[in-house]
Amino acid sequence: MRHFLPDVLAVVGPTATGKTDVGMLLAEALGAEIISADCMAVYRGMDVGTAKPTPEQQRRVRFHLIDVCNPDEPFSVARFQQMALEAIRHIRQRGALPLVVGGTGLYVKALLDGFHIPPAPADEMFRQQLWQRVSRLGSAALHAQLQQVDPQAASRIHPHDAVRIIRALEVYHLTGRPISAWQQRQPPAEVGRVRRFGLTLPRDLLYRRINERVERMIAQGWLDEVRRLLEAGYDPHLPAMRSLGYAQLVQVAQGKLPLQEAIALIQRETRRFAKRQLTWFRADKQIEWVDASQGADQTARQILERLRSEAQHT
């Protein structure tokens, strides 16, 4: 069957659908190495709260794009794209199959669909000026400005999404070209033919899994992990420390929020996050959806059967 496999296999979907377990089973069955498409798994020391593959799992299967920077280092989509393409080349040199696994939709799209990332470094002074305008006038005022210089980007970016609005204006300020012009899709030659599978669950089961997983990660020492990061001197205002779950537990560690209240907030925000992930991936018509409610073994078996079926009809 290896002869009929795609050049790259991808397993994507919302959080808590079992992507890592399914990916590992596929990697072991197909002789693949996993490229993590998770924007939080790149950070060292952030293990429990990112549901990062355990050391035992990483001994079973080779993972890439995990633990590649510290929480106070900037990590961009462009850097992910560059490192992931390099990983694909090295995986192929070893005669293995590149298997992309993760739920960060922008990372997946940048790698597989080939966003051309604008070569624009951050302009901190310009960025601070824009944040000051947001504080005074609100993000809608900046969205109106973006509408004038880049209507296409403005149509995709929500008026309340200040971070993406500011980045789009910054790119225009630095390059003289709208960010939408930079983001024209052209799949990189290194990627080749891709087969994409998305894992899905009934809404009630997905939400139950999310709630249980948050409680399990707390029991596994997530709060202690956050305390260690703060004790190591990481600023609680860093983007990594403001991410989902970490932001709430930083407040617990600082005595500003009761733990049980933080858990409820994390569960609620994770459910909302999963809904946004599903909306993002549903827009990709190349994804073949697989019901993951029967567990990782059955889900991996379904994917393997679809691959074999195509091989038999090719």
Image (cartoon, helix red, strand yellow):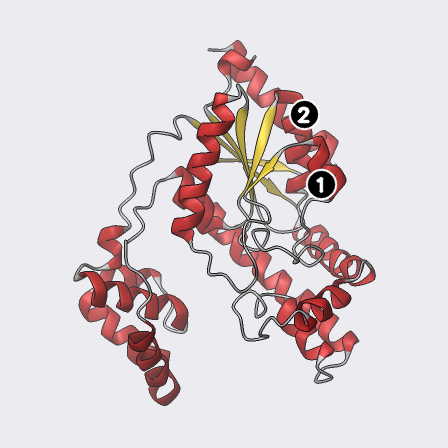
The relative height of residue 30 versus residue 257 in the rendered view (above or below) is above
Three-letter residue code for mark 2: Glu
Task: Give the Cα separation between the discs numbered 2 and 1.
Answer: 21 Å
Residue depicted at 54% across the width and 44% down the height: 65
Which of the pair 303/100 is nearer the observer?
Answer: 100
Residue 106 seen in the figure = yes
Three-letter residue code for mark 1: Ser
Camera-side mark, 2 or 1: 2
Does residue 127 appear left or right of residue 293 in this picture? left
Q: Is mark 2 on a helix, strand or loop?
A: helix
Which of the pair 210/176 is nearer the observer?
Answer: 176
Residue 28: mark:
2
Q: Quadrant of residue 27?
A: top right
Residue 125 position within the rendered picture, expressed as x and y whole percent measured from the top left: 31, 77
Residue depicted at 31% across the width and 61% down the height: 121
Residue depicted at 67% across the width and 33% down the height: 24
Q: Quadrant of residue 257?
A: bottom right
Residue 293: mark:
1
